[in-house]
Image: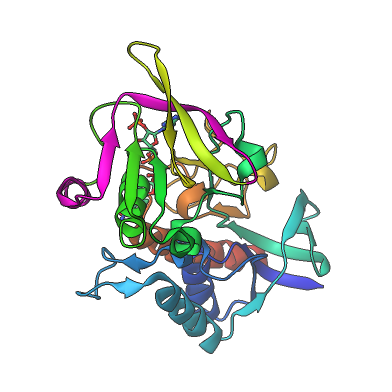
Amino acid sequence: MERELVIVGGGPAGLAAALYAARAGLDTVLYEEGMPGGKAATTERIENYPGFPDGIGGVELMMNMQAQAQRFGARMVNAGVEAIEPGDAQFILQTGEGRVTARAVILATGVTPRPLNVRGEAEFTGRGISFCATCDGPLFRDRVVAVVGGGDAAVEEALFLSRFARKVYLIHRRDALRATKVLQDRAFAEPKIEFLWHSVVQEVLGGRTVEAVLIRDVRSGETRAVAVDGVFVYIGMEPNSRLVRGLVALDEQGYVITDEEMRTSRPGIFAAGDVRRKTLRQVVTAVADGAIAAVTAGHYLEGLRG
Ligand code: NAP
């Protein structure tokens, strides 16, 4: 199969790129192996995307973005891309629907939650340890849960969980949150949330499911077990840049380095959204990246045509 432009990843960046590319008349196909919408679709409510003064459901916003791109002719394929190899003035992609060639590729593969890397994590993932409060939070009605981390994600999800859980411990390695002020204020005002400062999880304990977390005070080194039924891990993200490792320049953390027009170090490969090295990872910046990447890819393809 021959394609002009392949977009890898169906989150906000990929969907915005698909919209702009399709409207520019490019033969565009987007590959997404999971649910459309990426991480944004696992966010219960998005309150900081302009245009929705009361917020909008993550799933609703992302379904709308997908429908909008499709309306202008972008093709969506529910399959992954396993490899990208450079070929003669084109790229060869191994995908879930076979081998595909593309003249240009936009990588919009986003990020994946960073694991705790502690004892008990592998054993209890899916049996009390979760990386998605929106997906699993309602299972913990009237139970006690712990959220690990101090960024936007941890605080936002702790607030979400406080709607179901009897108690939410927020375990953070420092005594100051990294999260946006408005989220911090809400969390401090929520009586169900108890903050365990200067603490890290050393081990997750349990039988068939999670029963406790062993936390260590980073100042004194003392450990103690805190009884919980669930653990939600929000200690940051890692870039999904494996597909282009060795093909384009990455920074020391593995994020794709681009210029302001979303060009990577290799002509024909563009990157957009959270997978890119940038300072602000939000839906609003992801869609902006996607639009720019599509326009730049369009210019690149025009150049190839002469
Ligand atoms: P983040 O901002 O990188 O925060 C990660 C948190 O986990 C930090 O508080 C960090 O502690 C802690 N941490 C990191 N490694 C740890 C470890 N090994 N053990 C214990 N704690 C550790 O990540 P995020 O909250 O997932 O957010 C990712 C991006 O998405 C950010 O750009 C964020 O703004 C964005 N986001 C935005 C919203 C929103 O706007 N509503 C919602 C979700 C996510 P330190 O603070 O000590 O470094």
| Picture quadrant of residue 282 | bottom left
Please report the residue visible at 33 percent of the width from the left and 59 percent of the height from the top: 160
For residue 296: magenta?
no
Residue 62: % across, % down = 45, 74
Front residue of 153/40: it is 153
| Horizontal arrangement in the rendering, residue 57 relative to residue 194 (left or right) | right
Q: How many marks?
A: 0
Where 160 sits versus 228, above or below? Answer: below
Residue 206 highlighted magenta (yes or no): yes
Q: Is residue 195 left or right of residue 272?
A: left
- Picture quarter with ligand 1: top left
Residue closest to the far bottom = 71
Examine the rendering and report whether any part of residue 178 can be seen.
no
Name the spot of residue 186 as percent of width and height, x first. Answer: 18, 52
Q: Is residue 230 visible?
A: yes
Apparent side of residue 3 relative to residue 257 in the rendered image (left or right): right
Q: Could you say which is closer to the camera, residue 75 or residue 225?
A: 225
- Could you tell me which residue is drawn at 33 percent across and 40 percent down? 170
Q: Which residues are magenta?
A: 181-208
Query: x, y (%) of residue 229?
Result: 48, 47
Residues 167 and 301: in front is 167
Q: In which quadrant of the rendered image does the N terminus lie? A: bottom right
Residue 52: x and y in percent read: 25, 75
Residue found at the very far top of the displayed protein: 220
Residue occupying the point 45% across, 77% down: 65
